[in-house]
């Protein structure tokens, strides 16, 4: 699809050795976060493990694993919270772990999250290394690790699993492995609704590749073209399959999943509800500071995306990041969860990774180390609060 596609991918053993500094650094940051969480929780007479595995969305996933779909909660205001809102891959894996080991569903979710977070870190490194080089790849992984909401990467949530599948699907696109890209996009589509972002990236890149071949007249080898077409066919099957199944289950047709999300007061309104939420923060002075912080955060996200465009990130990364960002910022509910929803948009970090990669090692290590401590403290404070992340 581009000159990037012609660059030879390293062998598996060589790729692991190349990624080792990034993965070791990632493990150190996550270990720090877990230690700080354990100490903070113990001081408040809470269980850090319960916070990671048995609260908020983690409970919904384990209920799906244990009871299947059909569980719902009817609230006093008439809202219906149905577990059909939660995509099935993580519960399936939790059930698999419980079936082959003495671990519970919650334990399985934690184990999957830990393994998936390392796989995600490796995938992020692979993408960044392929596009910008090894040093930028290491910095990208560590920046993802030290995000303020980085503790979610160790929770029995689906963010780490989704990010791993998305990152490796994007890497497969960049290296011309279309069937792998489509298969991973299919699995990402079974993990979270935002799986459509991976599908969009695969499809846009594939169509662009077909178009370039037609214009150049270089379309003689049917093998690569058929593999690319198969990848494009596989990519949407996960998202489409689950959404259509929910529609059949609810009896409301292809749009049935939207009704399920409406029961959670969640939907896509172009950012109108979020804008109102931010505007309401300016009705008093203390909350105005929070409003200013939210505006600064949105501006930073937009600026990073524009920086990626100006830095000529590959088209699949731009499409994927654009869809993830739009869905996160323009959702009509759960405003406090937006930082978590943006976490899979790791290509936003690439401009910062490039800037850090240009610094001397000691200076970049100081910056990342300070951010790791701040992230660990914030994560412990956040999870010990009353609201869900």
Image (spheres, grey):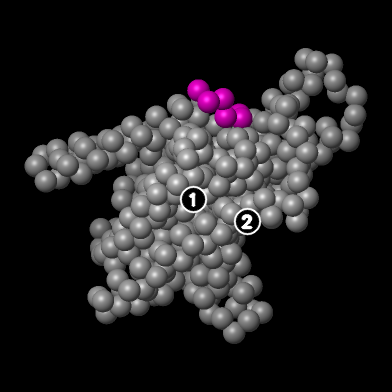
Q: Nearer the viewer, residue 190 or 374?
A: 374
Q: On the image, which quarter does residue 32 sit in?
A: bottom left
Percent position (x, y) of residue 145?
47, 53
Q: On the image, which quarter does residue 224 sit in?
A: top right
Rendered residue at 70%/31% (across/down): 4
Q: Earlier in the sequence, mark 1 or mark 2?
A: 2
Is any part of residue 88 visible from this angle? Answer: no
Give the number of callouts: 2
Considering every residue shown, the one lying at the far left of the view is 284
For the C terminus, the image quarter is bottom left
The overriding secondary structure of the stretch rendered in magenta is loop
Is any part of residue 292 visible from this angle? Answer: yes
Percent position (x, y) of residue 364?
44, 44
Rendered residue at 32%/39% (across/down): 297
Between the C-alphas of marks 1 and 2, the distance is 12 Å
* Left or right, 281 with reference to 158: left
- Is 157 inside the magenta-drawn segment? no
For the N terminus, the image quarter is top right
Q: On the image, which quarter does residue 270 sit in?
A: top left
Rendered residue at 64%/52% (across/down): 19
What residue does disc 1 label?
Answer: 142
Above or below, 276 against 221 in this view is below
Count neighbours of disc 1 (C-alpha within 10 A) and say few if under 14, some if 14 to 19, many if 20 or more.
many
Q: Which mark is residue 20?
A: 2
The kind of secondary structure element at disc 1 is: helix
* Span highlighted in magenta in the image: 310-315
Count neighbours of disc 2 (C-alpha within 10 A) and say few if under 14, some if 14 to 19, many if 20 or more.
some
Percent position (x, y) of residue 177?
76, 41
Rendered residue at 35%/68% (across/down): 36
Q: Which mark is residue 188?
A: none
The kind of secondary structure element at disc 2 is: helix
């Amino acid at each position: 699809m581009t000159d990037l596609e012609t660059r030879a991918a390293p062998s598996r053993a060589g790729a692991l050795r190349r990624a080792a500094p990034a993965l070791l650094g990632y493990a150190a940051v996550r270990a720090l976060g877990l230690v700080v969480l354990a100490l903070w929780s113990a001081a408040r007479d809470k269980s850090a493990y319960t916070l990671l595995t048995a609260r908020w969305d983690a409970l919904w996933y384990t209920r799906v694993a244990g009871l299947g779909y059909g569980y719902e909660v009817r609230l006093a205001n008439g809202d219906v919270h149905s577990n059909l809102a939660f995509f099935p891959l993580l519960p399936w894996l939790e059930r698999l772990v419980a079936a082959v080991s003495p671990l519970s569903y919650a334990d399985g979710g934690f184990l999957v999250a830990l393994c998936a977070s390392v796989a995600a870190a490796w995938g992020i490194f692979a993408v960044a290394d392929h596009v910008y080089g090894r040093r930028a790849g290491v910095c990208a992984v560590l920046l993802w690790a030290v995000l303020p909401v980085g503790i979610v990467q160790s929770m029995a949530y689906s963010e780490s699993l989704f990010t791993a599948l998305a990152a490796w699907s994007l890497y497969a696109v960049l290296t011309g492995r279309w069937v792998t890209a489509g298969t991973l996009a299919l699995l990402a589509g079974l993990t979270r609704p935002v799986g459509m972002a991976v599908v969009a990236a695969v499809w846009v890149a594939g169509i662009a590749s077909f178009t370039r071949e037609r214009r150049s007249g270089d379309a003689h080898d049917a093998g690569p073209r058929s593999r690319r077409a198969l990848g494009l066919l596989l990519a949407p099957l996960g998202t489409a399959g689950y959404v259509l199944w929910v529609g059949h289950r609810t009896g409301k047709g292809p749009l049935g999943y939207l009704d399920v999300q409406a029961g959670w007061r969640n939907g896509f309104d172009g950012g109108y509800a979020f804008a109102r939420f931010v505007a309401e923060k300016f009705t008093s002075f203390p909350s105005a500071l929070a409003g200013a912080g939210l505006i600064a955060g949105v501006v930073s996200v937009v600026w990073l995306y524009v920086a990626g465009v100006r830095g000529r990130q590959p088209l699949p990364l731009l499409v994927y990041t654009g869809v993830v960002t739009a869905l996160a910022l323009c959702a009509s509910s759960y405003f406090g969860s937006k930082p978590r929803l943006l976490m899979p948009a790791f290509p936003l970090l690439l401009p910062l990774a490039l800037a850090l990669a240009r610094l001397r090692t000691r200076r970049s290590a100081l910056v990342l180390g300070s951010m790791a401590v701040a992230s660990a403290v914030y994560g412990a404070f956040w999870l010990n609060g009353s609201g869900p992340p």
